[in-house]
Amino acid sequence: MSAALRQPGWYRAALYTAIGIAFSFGLSLATRAAYGLDVYKGEAVLFIAMLAAPLFFLVGLGCFDYWFRWAAGRPTIPEDHSGHGAKSWKDYFRPNTDHKVIGIQYTVTAFFFLFVGGLMAMLMRAELAQPGRQFVDPGEFNGLFSVHASILIFLFIIPVFAGLANYVLPLMIGAPDMAFPRLNALSFWLLPVAGVLMMSSFFMPGGSFASGWTAYAPLSTTAPPGQMAFTIGVQFAGASSIATALNFLVTIITMRAPGMSFFRMPLLVWANFSTSLLVVIATPFIAASQFFVLLDYALGFNFFRTAQDAGGDVLMYQHVFWFYSHPAVYIMMLPGFGIISEVLAVKSRKPIFGYRMMAFSLLAIVVLGFTVWAHHMFVSGMQPWIRIPMMVTTAIIAVPTGIKIFSWLGTLWKGVLHLDTPMLFALGFLTMFTLGGISGVMLAMIPLDIYVSDTYFIVAHIHYVLFGGSLFTIFAGVYYWFPKMTGRMFDERLGKLHFWTTFVFFNVTFAPMHLIGVQGMPRRVADYADQFATWNLVISLASFCLGLSTLIFAYNIVASWRGGPRAVSNPWRALTLEWQVSSPPPIFNFDDIPTVVGGPYEYGVPGAVHGVFKSPDPAPPAPAGGVGPSPAQQSAT
């Protein structure tokens, strides 16, 4: 046991977590004693522990071992790659530097949080099935929708895209791994830490955080201590996103295979390149907003507190928050655009229509995404003149998005369509996202936005965009790359059943919300007027069926992974590089060096090839007693 406690792993992580909690007690008691305050205050210990214990846990797990050795000047452990790749299921429960292992860790963990957040949605819909109180009181309801939204945004949609990209992006560009494998491993392990913090808020004094995923001040600066679980959890999730985005950027810029110019990159790579730019620029803003809330809450700073002439500015919180959170919508959309481009081209057997315009439109969305944040604040009390430019820029951002819709439709036109499960989810995305986009343009108009603000029309819009627009792409991507990830084929009949049940019950759940929203039903309430009872019962019943449909997906994935038919290396006859290696790929992705010689979507073009493979030239023999040529000289030859 003593040896296990010295080695990185779960035993040492548990020990270090206990040390972190003890450290929090000690630091709180010593600091309060030094300032002449009451020595013990539970909230102070809790706040410090929420910061310190996760960091001690990560150290114990071994996420920092290499860097500590390097910083201390000790001999670093030679990189023999002995821990690279997964040899058993246990390898998925420890830090691993293989991007494919990390991709699966990300994806499976994110889907775990999807089911947790989905269960909370079911409980909310059970409460709303009839007017009056059924199962939870208004405070508990506020906690449920707050944690539901936070988990699904920060711990499902954003990280699941990072997981899929982690697995396929290095393969697509012909790289053996990510640029910073150890940082990649740390990025993943920050994620479950954030999830545990957010879910643990239910067990804190006063209950879970209940200010919504927006955590508006002054609600968030005066709420019970559970609010800090959101504030600190977002810091860990944000650190994970920024580290992952930096890794993607450096990998894409520096590790592309010979011959892969930027305009030979698959559109999924373009999408993750654009998303990573958004994350690196925007995410520090939400980190700053939550850091200021933490300082206000724990140490009495006055960034956002206005009580007793403290001088804070609550409107500034919304400006800073939405300067991140509107671009965050595209962080949750752009990777899905890339997935859909891959699926539609392969399943239509046609080149992407307007490839370069698709790439430029992604970059246009990155730029325009920073010009529309205040359209979320039309009723906040900001200066009225700001509404006009924000309305105009919000309408303009529909242009690059519309380019993508028309390009996808052009790709489908006269294509040889294969309507299997990934294709059905891609077509479902096109339908749902277009509807969500139309209501988005409607909400850009100031009079309508003011009229339906804080009603169920907003709930319908956000779910058409994030469920119909993101989750459909995620399902399409999981089904599409499932054979590559697992070496198995999924059950096509269950896949189609999953799609149709999801498509039908999704629309029955969320389409009526437009209607009751226009009629005035407020969102974020546990009770409502009797006139909305019938539609709410329909919505609740449909939502239960929608929730059950995800069980079909879970069963299909688990059963197929365990015993599905063996997959060949390229079951879809795709051209991109990830499909030119075995399923699953070798540990370092490519036995031979790929060289890119053409575009990634030349379907239907006779003899077109995206990449070719050749063995590395043998190194010239070193002269006897002399020194062989340097790597640079070898490269020059």
Image: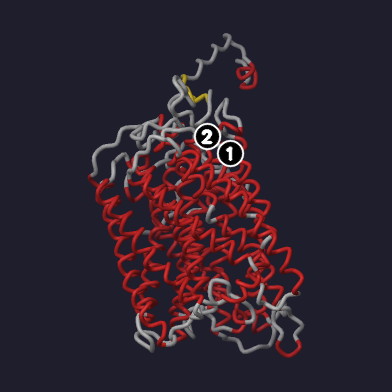
Quarter of the image for the N terminus: give it: bottom left
Q: Is the residue under label 2 in contact with that under label 1 (CB below 8 Å)?
A: yes
Left or right? Give the position of 101 relative to 338. left
The residue singled out by tag 2 in the image is: 173
Q: Residue drawn at (59%, 44%), measured in percent from left and top?
A: 273
* In the rendered image, the vertical position of residue 49 relative to residue 7, given as above or below: below
Density class for disc 2 (Cα within 10 Å; few <14, some 14-19, many ≥20) is many
* In the rendered image, the vertical position of residue 396 relative to residue 617, given as above or below: below
Q: Amino acid at mark 2?
A: Ile
Residue 549 position, x and y percent, is 30, 61
Q: Residue drawn at (56%, 55%), measured in percent from left and top?
A: 331
Residue 362 position, x and y percent, is 60, 46
What is the C-alpha distance between the residues marked 1 and 2? Answer: 7 Å
Quarter of the image for the C terminus: give it: top right
Front one among 612 and 37: 612
Q: Looking at the rendered structure, which numbered label has been put on residue 498? A: none
Q: Residue drawn at (41%, 29%), measured in percent from left and top?
A: 580
Left or right? Give the position of 567 relative to 324. left
The residue singled out by tag 1 in the image is: 252
Q: Report how many numbered discs are placed on residues in the image.
A: 2
Q: Amino acid at mark 1?
A: Ile
> In terms of image quadrants, where is residue 440?
bottom right
Front one among 261 and 74: 261
Front one among 373 and 257: 373
Q: Secondary structure at mark 2?
A: helix
Left or right? Give the position of 318 relative to 618. right
